Image: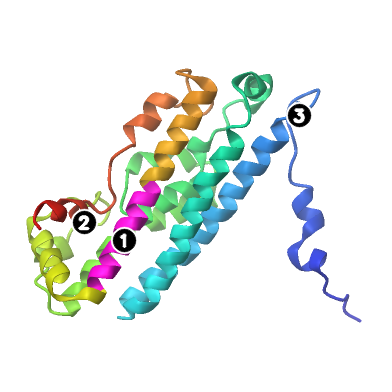
Amino acid sequence: MAEELTYGSYLKIDELLSLQRPQSDPVEHDELLFIIIHQIYELWFKEVLHELDELVDYLNEDRPALSGHQLKRVLKILKTLVAQLDVLETMTPLEFVSFRAFLARSSGFQSAQFRELEFLLGLKDAAHLARFVDNPRERDNLTRRYHAPGIWDAFLAYLARLDYTVPAEVLERDVTAPVAPSDGVQQVLLAIYREDAELARLCESFTDLDEGFQEWRYRHVMMVHRTIGTKAGTGGSDGVAYLRSTLFHPAFPDLWAVRSLF
């Protein structure tokens, strides 16, 4: 007879609660908070990828109304990700340094799911692929994302199927390159804002997604600066200096550039 499904067995609570394993010895109090916050981030990244993949499918199937639902959900998640930084910032620099050495070279810089999210948004950098050679699953997932069209590519292809004059060089671009602004695309967006209220709302939702992602980046930079100052990151990165270099690089630059044309 099959075991009865319960809350705990369905959610694998015993396994879940066994996954927080501090490395400090003796165990420092705040290391548990640090582990839980970052594990939660990885779960949210998994959900965001799940939702945005669905969004791309809906665009490819010419069902943009459903993609708007996925965008709304992701935007709520991004707000949650930012709010979690408030919890992490209750940990003082001295509390973090009490266990930082035990992290060795592990770092959020090595989050494969976060790199997948960047790639899906069109923020691609081949240098990240080399950082995951020791984990075939992560490397394969990231390689697939690197060579696949991103969200913006799917949206422009959808517009082209609606007979908007999206430039051919944009539709046929090298999808492994970061998204670059296009005067032709901006003219298409200008027409949408003036003539199609429903599509204009979808464009605004994409702008919200871009802004929400950048907001999380900014808050993350400030949290790291507040916690470790200008010291190098544990994963071998330049710490705050590297994180600052990622700021203010929109995923969908045409949506920002078109605002100067109204």
Determine whether the residue tagged by mark 2 lies in a helix, strand or loop. helix
Residue 28 at x, y = what percent? Answer: 75, 26
Residue under label 2, please give it: 255
Residue ID at (54%, 33%): 107
- Asked whether 185 or 198 is in front, the reply is 198
Q: Amino acid at mark 3?
A: His
Residue 214 at x, y = what percent? Answer: 36, 45
Residue under label 1, please give it: 206
Residue 153 seen in this snapshot: yes
Mark linked to residue 216: none
Residue under label 3, please give it: 29
Number of residues whose C-alpha sits closer than 10 Å to that of mark 3, classed few (under 14), some (14–19) or many (20 or more): some
Magenta region, residue range: 199-213
Cβ–Cβ under 8 Å for marks 2 and 1: yes
- Asked whether 228 or 161 is in front, the reply is 228
Mark 2 or mark 1, earlier in chain? 1
Residue ID at (51%, 29%): 235
Q: Quadrant of the C terminus?
A: bottom left
Q: Quadrant of the N terminus?
A: bottom right
Magenta-drawn stretch contains 114: no
Q: Residue furthest right?
A: 1
On the image, which quarter does residue 69 sit in?
bottom left
Q: Amino acid at mark 1?
A: Phe
Q: Amino acid at mark 2?
A: Leu
The answer to whether residue 190 is above or below residue 32 is below
